[in-house]
Image (spheres, rainbow, N blue to C red):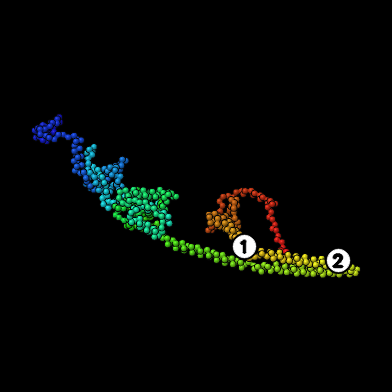
Amino acid sequence: MVAPFPDPASDGDTPARLLAEASRGDNAPALSVGQLSAAIKRAVEDGFSRVRVRGELSGAKRAASGHFYAALKDDNALIDMVMWKGQAARLAFRPEDGIEVIATGRVTTYAGRSKYQLVVDSLEVAGEGALMLLFEKLKARLGGEGLFDRERKQGLPFLPRTIGVVTSPTGAVIRDILHRLADRCPAHVLVWPVLVQGEGAAAQVANAVRGFDALRPGGAVPRPDLLIVARGGGSIEDLWAFNEEPVVRAIADCSIPVISAVGHETDVTLADYAADRRAPTPTAAAEMAVPVRAELQAQLATWQGRLMGAANRVRLLGGERLAALARHLPRRESLYAPQRQRLDEAEGRLDRTLHHRLDRAAERFAALERLLPPPTALFTARQQQLVGTCRHMEQWTRNQMARTEERLTSRAHILRPALLERNWQRDRARLDGLGRLLSSLDPRALLARGYAMVRSADDDAVISTAAGARAAGRMKLHFADGGVSVLVAEGAGAAPAPVAALAPSPRAKAKKPKEQGELF
């Protein structure tokens, strides 16, 4: 038998009761568990309806419903916390384990497990030290994904026609950028106005970068060749929008080169690591974006002078080469002299021949005259006819000489200097073409591209077939930078039967060049 428990309100002589009965004078009726839990809930919520708790996040997780659950702890205690979906969506940072925060909310109880928890309305990073810890953790995580790798960086265009600027439209940053661009080299600027600080700034900056990247070439709004994400200086808390993960990912994924110009020279954000180029100030970003127009003009003038000088040198060298070649050509008088001499000799021979024939005819006439009877009328007429024939022959000879001289004079234009120069230029162009063809057929050019020339080691004859290589046994391979002696390891096989050369067709005989006749 179990001994009864003694009643603490009674002395030791009063026996314990088995059934619960209301005691005389007892005004505290028994409460149910739910009533007690509700009373505790009211007491806790009334006493701690507005509290600010500082602690380190532990076990942070975001549920599929959007609610955020974690625990706040320090060296002595731990309290659970919950942040409902609406408040969690407005967080300015991504809460992670190990970050020291200050939570503002109210304490309530959870009757289902007899525990209390903190319902958080706002969550802030506790001081710049904790904010820098969050910065380093986010930098390490995004850097581990490769968003800051040098291989992802793009080169900036040399002379962008359109520049997109993501910044506040009312600050001094946009005025500094426009003024600097106008001083150096004016360009078409598109401004996407955004908030650069406070709630919603990170989302607007990320949407602006993705919006510029979504533009297509040739559309109503020109696609920028370069983006500048800019903001003035401030504290790390002021610049925190450019450390947000959506902004960093938007800049890293942008196909347009991006210059980050957030803060002053000492301010560093994660947007600087993700951008293709970091500028210490917005003014420096404008200087990186475009070159100086005056320097470009001076450079172009220098190049133009060099180009004109090179062209003049080519012209002068060509003139010198032409004059040198012209000195080797025969003079016009020397070309005419043999022809004139031949003409004079022909004229002299013709004159002598005519007089010789006239003399022979006179002698023959005198001999015939001696054989004939005395002159008669018929003989006189015959004599006159012969004299007329001789005169006609003399006139015909002179006419032939005149026509020959005219023909020689008409053909003399062939030897004019302009025609000689034209023929020389045509022959020079043909010679240059043959030179280029010879260069293209030069086997040494093939050796420079990786080919090799195979020659016999004995007589240095070119080997062009496998049978020839097997028959030679020892060969020498000529490369572009030297030769290598090799031996044929494969046995010499039977050489293929020679193919009879086709007999040349009678039509393929080369025509004998037509001989040029004499000038006269």
The residue depicted at 35 percent of the width and 57 percent of the height is: 175
Q: Image quarter for residue 65?
A: top left
> Residue 330 appears at what percent x and percent y?
64, 67
C-alpha distance separating marks 1 and 2: 60 Å
Query: Can residue 131 be seen in the rendering of this structure?
Result: yes
| Structural crowding at the residue carrying mark 2, measured as other residues with C-alpha within 10 Å and reported as few (<14), some (14–19) or many (≥20) | few
Q: Image quarter for residue 429?
A: bottom right
Res 382 label: 2
| Structural crowding at the residue carrying mark 1, measured as other residues with C-alpha within 10 Å and reported as few (<14), some (14–19) or many (≥20) | few
> Residue 246 appears at what percent x and percent y?
34, 48
Q: 313 above or below 506?
A: below
Q: List the residue tagged with mark 1.
A: 422
**Looking at the rendering, in which quadrant would you find the N terminus?**
top left
- Helix, strand, or loop for circle 1? helix
> Residue 106 appears at what percent x and percent y?
22, 44
The residue depicted at 19 percent of the width and 40 percent of the height is: 42
- Residues 148 and 3: in front is 148
Q: Image quarter for residue 339?
A: bottom right
The residue depicted at 67 percent of the width and 67 percent of the height is: 335
The residue depicted at 63 percent of the width and 63 percent of the height is: 419
> Residue 507 appears at what percent x and percent y?
69, 52
Q: Which numbered disc, 1 or 2, marks the residue that appears first in the sequence?
A: 2
As shown in the figure, which amino acid type bears the numbered disc 1?
Arg
As shown in the figure, which amino acid type bears the numbered disc 2?
Arg
Q: Of tags 1 and 2, which is closer to the observer?
A: 2
